[in-house]
Amino acid sequence: MAEVSLSDKRKEERPVRRVEVCFSPRQFDLYKDEFHTCVVIDVLRATSAICTGLANGVDRIIPVPTVEEARALKAEGCIAAAERNGQIVEGFDFGNSPRAYMSGELKGKTVALTTTNGTKAIDMAKEMPQVAIGSINNLDAICTWLMQQPGDVLLLCSGWKDKFNLEDTICAGAIADNLIDIARYKSEEDSTIAAKHLFLGVRGNIFSFLKASSHRRRLRNLNLGEDIKYCLTPNTVNVVPVLHDGALIDARRIKEGVVKDLSH
Ligand code: MLT
């Protein structure tokens, strides 16, 4: 009989946890009370930009649901970024293109961010015990981090104006598949089974499959093809943004106990 290693044994001793997918913020109320950790996903482009920003030295990102709140933080001296319908809102210097967050210009800074769907979903999730950010760009990092956390996991797709979208569902399917496949997770909901099978069906081919997606078309019409390519590239960054005192920071900073006060 094969010898069971200590780490295999520890894995077996861990309780089985649940991972489920919520297709749209509109359905969030149906799920929220059953889970410990909520992972908010907005592949095109909010959560990809957040992961990229923190990986490139942005100090923290304050997600706000409305343009008015972003404007108020800007008036207080905070750098503010605002996107609506794929475009930078007038009066703001930044939107949610991940490329803007790579330039170094925002290194060490606090950025207030509002986007059409992503920051609205983060705002909804903020009452949950733990909120983290997922994207295709930080796929391995978010899966590894989740496996080290206690409790059940809800994968919240930001969608488009409360409607289902393909890219967030595929990303949620990839995370759920990973957790169920290599750790002690199970799912009970049909939404999770559907997301997983969608991911498994297109995983070698996500970029071309998503040519048909509505938001990809929207972004292409705005000449944002480079953003799409980047957001659909797995594991460009190794960071897990988590919500801490109203701001998104790199989870490693909490572990290391080096989070400073939140003044900006
Ligand atoms: C959003 O939050 O709705 C998206 O990031 C929209 C976009 O791609 O600009």
Image (cartoon, rainbow, N blue to C red):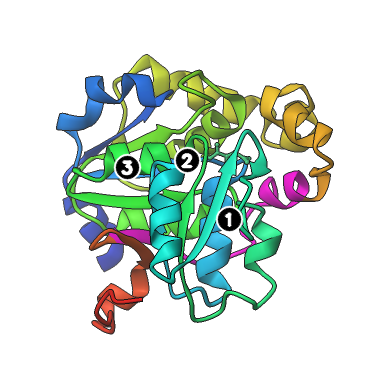
Determine if residue 3 is in view: no
Image mark for residue 118: 2
Is 150 left or right of 171, judged from the image as shown? Answer: left
**SS of the residue at dot 2?**
helix
The structure residue drawn at horizontal position 29% and vertical position 76%, both measured from the top left corner, is 263
Identify whether 100 is placed above or below 23: below
Identify the residue under disc 1.
49
- Ligand 1 is within 8 Å of the C-beta of the residue at disc 2: yes
Give the crowd class for mark 1: few <14, some 14-19, many >=20 residues within 10 Å. Answer: many
Query: Quick one: label 1 or label 2, which is nearer the N terminus?
Result: 1
Q: What stretch is highlighted in magenta?
A: 227-243
Residue designated by label 3:
123
Q: Label 3: few (<14), some or many (≥20) within 10 Å?
A: some
User: In terms of image quadrants, where is residue 55?
Assistant: bottom right
Q: Are marks 1 and 2 in contact (CB under 8 Å)?
A: no
Of the numbered discs 2 and 3, the one sitting upstream in the chain is 2
Residue 223 pos. (x, y %): 84, 41
Looking at mark 1, is its residue's CB closer than 8 Å to ligand 1? yes
